[in-house]
Amino acid sequence: MAIDHTAAGRPDTTLETVRVEAFGATFDLDATSLDRSAADLRRQVGEYERGERETFDCSVTYPDDFTGRVMRAMREIPFGETRTYGDLAAALDTAPVAVGGACGRNPVPLVVPCHRVVASDGGLGGYSASGGLDTKRRLLVHEGVLEE
């Protein structure tokens, strides 16, 4: 796991974007949405990747719109479980395709676990982070939802 960041020579400050490499993929986290330093995010992602952490200990600033509502719902999905786009849509009184669009706009994948939202037909659905569905599959295998 690696992380790229710059902030006036201070690598432990909260930045606009923190690039984290984990599970063979690159995740760009919008650090303005999180209340943790780059070093703390690095530590937490490393613990998650090593199986030492199931949730991320940080507050998220959610957008004041539909995407924010979907992000809140995704953050409630426990480690090792999934919900369908339809499940979230029913809970939010909207269409599954709208939930999928909001998942694709998630600025903090991993922290807000959009990989835990899957298609109702048993498929994975989509995944907009680096590596696409291969990354989503690796994350769900890591969490014990799918077998290797």
Image: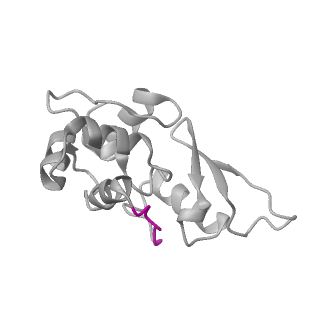
Question: Vertical placement of 7 versus 141: above or below?
Answer: below
Q: Residue at x 41, y 55 (%)?
A: 51
103 in magenta: no
Residue 15 sits in quarter:
bottom right
Q: Residue at x 15, y 41 (%)?
A: 86
The one of 148 and 8 positioned closer to us in this rendering: 8
Residue 74 sits in quarter:
bottom left
Q: Predominant secondary structure in magenta? A: loop
One can see residue 19 in this view = yes
Report the side of 104 relative to 116 (left or right): right
Total marks in image: 0
The one of 59 and 100 positioned closer to us in this rendering: 100
Q: Quadrant of the C terminus?
A: top left
Region of the chain picked out in magenta, as a range? 58-64
Report the side of 43 relative to 68 (left or right): right
**How far across and down, in percent of the image, does residue 95 sit?**
19, 40
Report the side of 46 relative to 126 (left or right): right
**How far across and down, in percent of the image, does residue 5 sit?**
74, 55
**How far across and down, in percent of the image, does residue 134 sit?**
42, 27
**How far across and down, in percent of the image, does residue 30 sit?**
58, 55
60 in magenta: yes
Report the side of 146 relative to 15 (left or right): left
Question: Vertical placement of 97 versus 68: above or below?
Answer: above
